[in-house]
Structure formats: structure tokens, C-alpha cells
């Protein structure tokens, strides 16, 4: 029985601990895909120069490279030193799949999919062993929910609910994307990308296609 566990853990023992200490206002959102060359992390909440100084001075960060960004948020590929606690790998080793991961100075919040509830217990135990102070915010089974509900991450679900409550989907809109991003305390780009991912998950579920099938294909134009 597939379940989703929403966990909060201390950022103090993770590879970004020193970065959060040097840049207290920093916020971080991990890309859904984890690649072998490192982790893609959206960093915001402070000037780019301050963030890069923190990245350069953090002993747990071996290498980093700017991938893309704008005036408010930047995507970095980050590689951690070998002895650093690899939070994402730890979850994978215990049978979990990270659907969403974001962090502020004090904590990470993770949405993790597990095949059995015992896997969630194993993940919790491993996090405790590394003094990461895990707290279960929510644990629920996906059985009995609609495909759309089970495919959305917690952040995506909460963002869509906020958008509905603030009238973002009304015609005409009661709130702009900029106003909604300020209400949710995220950058305009972060909100835009989170909404697009949520739309894609909902559409893929309603059309009964896999994530791979929902990937866009190159096209020279659109047709009816």
C-alpha cells in the first residue's frame, strides 16, 4: 500500500547547515530529479553574491555551479563532500522516493512516497540515528484518493488551495501571480514553476498517462 509521509527535520546536520548559518534568510527548494553529478537546488531569500560566498565557504560543499536563475532565485548544481550526510540518498536507501523537498534556516520539509508504512518507520529511525530530529507532519495512504490528489506534492497541493482561496483562478482574477507569490512568501518564478508542475501532475492523472508520457515532445508548431 503506497503512502506519503510529510516530514520535517533539522537542517543542522545536513550538508547545507553551514550555508544556512552564514545566510540566515536563505530558502532552498530541491528539483524533483536527483542526478549523479549532484543535486539541483533553487536558492533564494538573499542577494546572489551573498549566497555564492556562503556556498564557497561551506566545508560540506565540494563544488557548485550556477545553472539558471533570475533576479530573485537561482538554480545551482551542488556536490557535497564525501563524508557529508546525504539526506536524499539516506531516504532512497530505506525505500523512499522524495517527491518534494524545501528548506529554510532551521528545517527541511520533505514529501516522501513509500511502498509500505514500515518504510516510513525505517526512514524515521535512520534520520534519528543521524540526529536530524524528524517530526512526522502527516502520513496518509494514497489508496482511496483520486489520481490527481495522490500525484500532487504537499507544496503543490497547498499552493493550488491558496490560489483557489485567493481567487487566482477567477475570471477576471482577484489576485495576480505577483500578489499570490508575496502572500505565499515565495518568488514569482518559484510560484510559476510550482503551479506548472502541479498542472502537469493533474493533467497527467486525469488523462491517465505516466510522467514519462506527459513529457513534452519537440514540435515546430501547434495544430488543432
Image (tube, grey):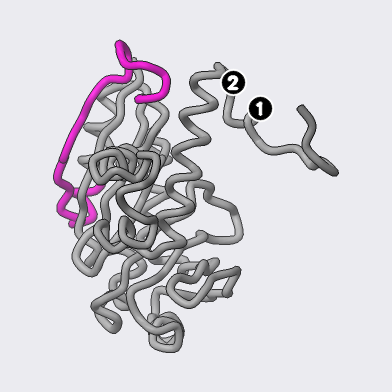
Q: Eyeballing the image, is 210 above or below 5? A: above
- Please state the horizontal and vertical placement of residue 166, each as a whole percent of the image: 25, 46
For the residue carrying disc 1, how many other residues have a C-alpha within 10 Å: few (<14), some (14-19), or many (20+)? few
Residue lying farthest to the front in this orientation: 172
Q: Which residue matches tag 1?
A: 213
Q: Quadrant of the C terminus?
A: top right
- Please state the horizontal and vertical placement of residue 156, each as a whole percent of the image: 36, 41
- Please state the horizontal and vertical placement of residue 95, each as a whole percent of the image: 39, 32
Determine contact: label 1, label 2, CB under 8 Å.
Answer: yes
Identified at 26% across, 23% down, the residue is: 117
- Please state the horizontal and vertical placement of residue 130, each as a whole percent of the image: 23, 55
In the figure, residue 77 lies in which quadrant? bottom right
Identified at 29% across, 60% down, the residue is: 103
Label 1 sits on a secondary structure element that is loop
Is 135 on the left-hand or right-hand side of 141?
A: left
Q: Which residue matches tag 2?
A: 209
Q: Nearer the viewer, residue 180 or 114?
A: 180
For the residue carrying disc 2, how many other residues have a C-alpha within 10 Å: few (<14), some (14-19), or many (20+)? few
Q: Nearer the viewer, residue 85 or 54?
A: 54
Q: Nearer the viewer, residue 200 or 133?
A: 200
Q: Tally the numbered discs.
A: 2
Q: Eyeballing the image, is 222 above or below 34? A: above
In the figure, residue 120 lies in which quadrant? top left
Q: Quadrant of the N terminus?
A: top left
- Magenta residues? 127-149
Amino acid at each position: 500500500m503506497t503512502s506519503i509521509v510529510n516530514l520535517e527535520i533539522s537542517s543542522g546536520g545536513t550538508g547545507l547547515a553551514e550555508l544556512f548559518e552564514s545566510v540566515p534568510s536563505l530558502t532552498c527548494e530541491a528539483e524533483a530529479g536527483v542526478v549523479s553529478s549532484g543535486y539541483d537546488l533553487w536558492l533564494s531569500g538573499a542577494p546572489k553574491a551573498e549566497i555564492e560566498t556562503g556556498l564557497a565557504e561551506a566545508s560540506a560543499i565540494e563544488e557548485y555551479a550556477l545553472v539558471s536563475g533570475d533576479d530573485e532565485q537561482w538554480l545551482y548544481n551542488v556536490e557535497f563532500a564525501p563524508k557529508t550526510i546525504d539526506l536524499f540518498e539516506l531516504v532512497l536507501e530505506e525505500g523512499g522516493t522524495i517527491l518534494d523537498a524545501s528548506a529554510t534556516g532551521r528545517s527541511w520539509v520533505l514529501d516522501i512516497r513509500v511502498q509500505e508504512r514500515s518504510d516510513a518507520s525505517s526512514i524515521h529511525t535512520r534520520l534519528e540515528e543521524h540526529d536530524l530530529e524528524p517530526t512526522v507532519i502527516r502520513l496518509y495512504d494514497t489508496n482511496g484518493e483520486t489520481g490527481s490528489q495522490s500525484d500532487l506534492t504537499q507544496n503543490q497541493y497547498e499552493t493550488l488551495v491558496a490560489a483557489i482561496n485567493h481567487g487566482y483562478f477567477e475570471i477576471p482574477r482577484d489576485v495576480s501571480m505577483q500578489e499570490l507569490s508575496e502572500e505565499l512568501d515565495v518568488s514569482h518564478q518559484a510560484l510559476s514553476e510550482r503551479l506548472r508542475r502541479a498542472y502537469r501532475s493533474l493533467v497527467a492523472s486525469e488523462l491517465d498517462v505516466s510522467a514519462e508520457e506527459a513529457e513534452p515532445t519537440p514540435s515546430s508548431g501547434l495544430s488543432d
